[in-house]
Image (spheres, rainbow, N blue to C red):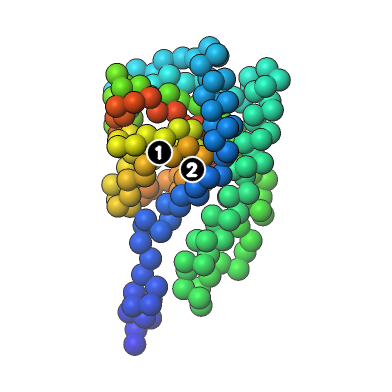
Amino acid sequence: MKLHYELKRSNDAYLSDCIISYPNIVPRLLCNELIEFFERSITFKIDDHRKQSREMQLMGDPRAQAAAYRHILKDSIFPLGEKYERTLHDICHVDYRPADEPMTKMFQTGFRSLQIQKYTSEDSGYPAVHIESGPDHIRKYLAVIVFLNDVITDGETIFPMGGNAIQPEAGKVVIWPAGLPFYHCGNKSATDKYILTSWFEFM
C-alpha cells in the first residue's frame, strides 16, 4: 500500500484536533478578581471594522496587583504550552512523531502580552475572521484565550475551518496555532463577555 494511503487510513487528524480547550484552569475566584480589577482600571476603547471592545494590558502595568496577577497567570497558563505540544506529537502517526522536545521547553519562550478585553451587548464583538500571526507578530507560535466569565447562549469563538464554536466558560483556556489556517472570530454577545488573550512567543 502506498504510504500516503496508509497515513490517510490510519492517522487522518482533523484541524479541530489542534484547537484544544482546557476547562477549569484559572480559578473562578481569580477570574472574578481580574474582572473587578479591569473595571477599576483605565481602559481604552477599540471601535473599528474589525472589532468593538474595551481593553487593558497587564504587561507593563506598574501596580503591585497587576504584577501579582501576571505571575499567577503565567504559573497557570504557561505549563499548558508544553502539554499542548505533546498532545500534537501524540496526534502524529506513531512512526513519524517529532523527536525533539516541545518548542515551549526547548527555547526561551513566554508571554509579551496579557490583555483583558470586555465585550458588551452593544458591541459587535470581533466579527473579522483573522489569524494571530503577521509581519509584526512573527515570534508568536501559539494563541491563547482565557474566558473570564460564562456566556450561556452566544459570544462563541468561531473557527470556521476547524469546525469549532467554543462557548465562553469561566476559567477555560483555549490554545491553537497562531498562523494559517487557524482563522477565527468572536460572535456578538447579548451579555458582557470578558476574556484574557495572549500568545506563546519566542523571546
Q: What residue type is labelled 2?
A: Lys
Picture coordinates of residue 133, whole percent (x, y): 44, 40
| Residue 179 visible in this rendered orientation of the protein | yes
Question: Which of the 4 image quarters holds residue 112?
Answer: top right
- What's the distance in space between the residues labelled 1 and 2, CA to CA? 7 Å
Q: Which of 131 and 42 is in front in this view?
A: 42
Q: Give me the disc on residue 129.
A: none
Query: Helix or strand or loop: what does disc 2 sit on?
Result: loop
> Residue 172: which numbered mark, if any?
2
Q: Is residue 201 above or below residue 61?
A: below
Q: Which of 129 and 23 is in front in this view?
A: 23
Locate residue 155, reporting x and y percent. 33, 34
Question: In the image, is 71 to the left or to the right of 20?
Answer: right
At x 62%, y 64%, the residue is 100
Q: Do the residues labelled 1 and 2 touch (CB within 8 Å)?
A: yes
Amino acid type, label 1 = Pro
186 relative to 17, above or below: above
Residue that carries the numbered disc 1 in the rendered image: 168
- Relative horizontal placement of residue 14, taking residue 100 as reference (left or right): left
Residue at (49%, 47%) from the top-left corner? 23
Q: Residue at x 56, y 67 (%)?
A: 98
